[in-house]
Amino acid sequence: MMDELTGRGAVSEKKSGFAAYLRRVWAVAAKDVRTELRAREIVVTMAAFAVLAAVVFGLAFDLRVPRAELVVPGILWVIVLFTGVLGLQRSFGSETDRGTLTGLLLAPVERSAIYFGKVAANLLYFLIVEALLAPTLLILFDVNLAQPIILLGLLMGTLGYAIVGTLFAALTVRSRAREALLPVLLLPVLAPLFIAGVSLTAVVLDARPAGEAWRWVGILALYDALFLAIALLLFDLIWEQG
Amino acid sequence: MSTLSKAARSDTRQWPLLLLDILAVLTMALAMWAGLIYAGDAINLAGEEQVAQRIFYFHIGSNIAALLGFLGSVVGSAGYLLTRRLVWDSWAAASVEIGTIFGFFVLLSGSIWAKPAWNTYWTWDPRLTTAAITVLIYIAYMLFRNGFESRATRALFSSIYALFAFLSVPLTFYSARLFRSIHPVIVAGSNQESQGDFALGATMGQALTISTVGFAVLFLALLFHRVRQLSLEAQIEQLQMERDE
C-alpha cells in the first residue's frame, strides 16, 4: 500500500541505492531552482525584504543603542526568520497556484525525495539571501559577521529552519488561511533555534571563550537531527488524503 | 422518536460526569481554603512577598493542569496517528483548549507574584520562556485546526503539528536554561541563584498536595465535558449530512 502511494515500487526496483535516491532529490531541487531562475519570484522578493528590514532596524536603533554589537545578533536572526517565512509560503504555494502540485506528487519518486528536494531549494534561497544580508549589516551597523563560528551557526540554523519550514509549508498549503497561518505555526516551534542562533552570534561578537559558542552549535545540531528524523517519519502522511 | 431516545440515553450517561463536577467543585473549594487559610506563612519572607507567596498554590495547581493538557495533546495526537480514530483527535483538541486556559493562569499568576518577588512582571527565565512558548504553540494549534473542512485532514495535520511542538518544547527549555535562571525550584531540589525562594513547612506541603489534586480533578472534569461536547458536535454534523443527502 505504502509502496504504491510513494511510487517506491515503480522506481526503486530499477534504480535503487543511495546515489539514485540523491539523483531524484536533485531532480526535484533542480526543477524548483530552474522555475525560480525563470520566474524570479522568491529570492528577489526575499532579498529585497531582508535589506529593507535591515534598513528599518537601522532607523529604529540608530543612536538609541550604545554599541551595535548589542543588537545585531537579534536583528540578524529576526530578519532571517521573517524573510524565510516569505520564501516558504511560495515553496508549495506556487505549486498549488499553478496546479502543478498534483503533477509533482504523481512523479515516480518517493515523497521524501520531493521533500528533500524542496528543503534543498529553500536552503539555497535562504543562503543566497543571508550572503546578501551579512554585508548589508556590515555596512549599516559596522559589525563583521564573517567569522567561522557565526557562519557555521547560520548554516546549521538555516538548515533546521528549512527542514521544519518546508514541512510546515506543506501542512499549511492545504489550509484555508495558509499565508497568514505559516508564521504563527512556525515561530514558536523555531524558538530553540532562534535562542541558540542569537546566543551563538552574541557569544562570538562579544569575543567570549569559544567553548560557549560550541555549546550553542551543539543545540543547533541536536535541533537539526531531531527534526530531520521526525520530518522524515511524518512527511509521507501529509499527502495521504485527497 | 429515535432522536428522543438517543437524547435520553446520553442523559443517563451524564451522571458519572456530574459526580466528577461535584468532586471538582469540592476539591477546588478545599484547595482555596488550604492555600489561603490553612497553609502557614513562609518563615523567611515578610511584607508584600509574604502575601504574594500564597498565589503559589494556584500557580502550581494551574501548572499541573497545563502540563496534563500538554501530555494529553501528545498522547491524543500520537494515538490518532497510530489508530486513525477521530476520538483520539478530540481528546488532543480538548486537552489543548483546556491546557491553554490553565497556561494563561500560570503566566498570569506568575507575573503577579514576580512583581513583588523579582521586581519585574516578566523575565526570560527558561521556565517562563517555555511556558510562554507552549501557550503560543497551543494558540497556533487551535488556529490551525479552524482551517480545515474535512475532519480527517484536520485531525491528521494537527496531530503532526502537535508532535513537532512536543519535540520543540523541551529543546526550548534546554536552550533557555543555558542562560542564568532565577526561578525558584520549590518542589524538587533548589536553584542556588533563585530569588524569592522559600522552604515548604508541613501545612504548606499539605496545601500544595490538595491544590495539585484539586486542579487535576478540575482539569479532568473540564476535559470530559469538552470531549463530550466535541463528540456531540460531530454527531450533529453527521445527522445534518445524512439529512442533506
Image: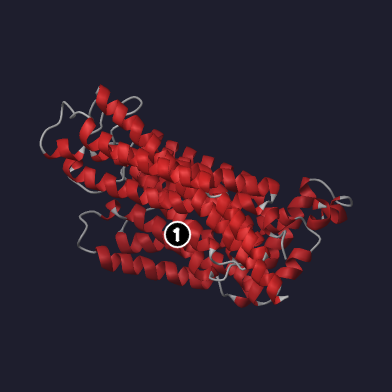
Q: Nearer the viewer, residue A135 or A172?
A: A172
Binning the other alpha carbons within 10 Å of mark 1 as few (below 14), some (14 to 19) or many (20 upward) gives many
Q: Residue at x 52, y 58 (%)?
A: A127
Q: Amino acid at mark 1?
A: Val
Q: Is residue A86 above or below residue A198?
A: below
B163 sits to left or right of B104: right
Q: Nearer the viewer, residue B14 or A133?
A: B14
Q: Nearer the viewer, residue A95 or B153?
A: B153
Q: Residue at x 87, y 56 (%)?
A: A10
Is any atom of residue A131 visible in this view? no
B123 sits to left or right of A127: left
**Which residue, given by chain and number where applicable, does mark 1 sit on?**
A80
B22 sits to left or right of A222: left
The image quadrant where one finds the N terminus of chain B is bottom right
Q: Chain of mark 1?
A: A
Q: Position of residue B238 (x, y in %)?
A: 66, 66
Q: Residue at x 23, y 31 (%)?
A: B38
Is any atom of residue A4 visible in this view? yes
Q: Is residue A186 above or below residue A51?
A: above
Q: Position of residue B140 (x, y in %)?
A: 47, 58
Q: Is residue B213 above or below residue A234?
A: above
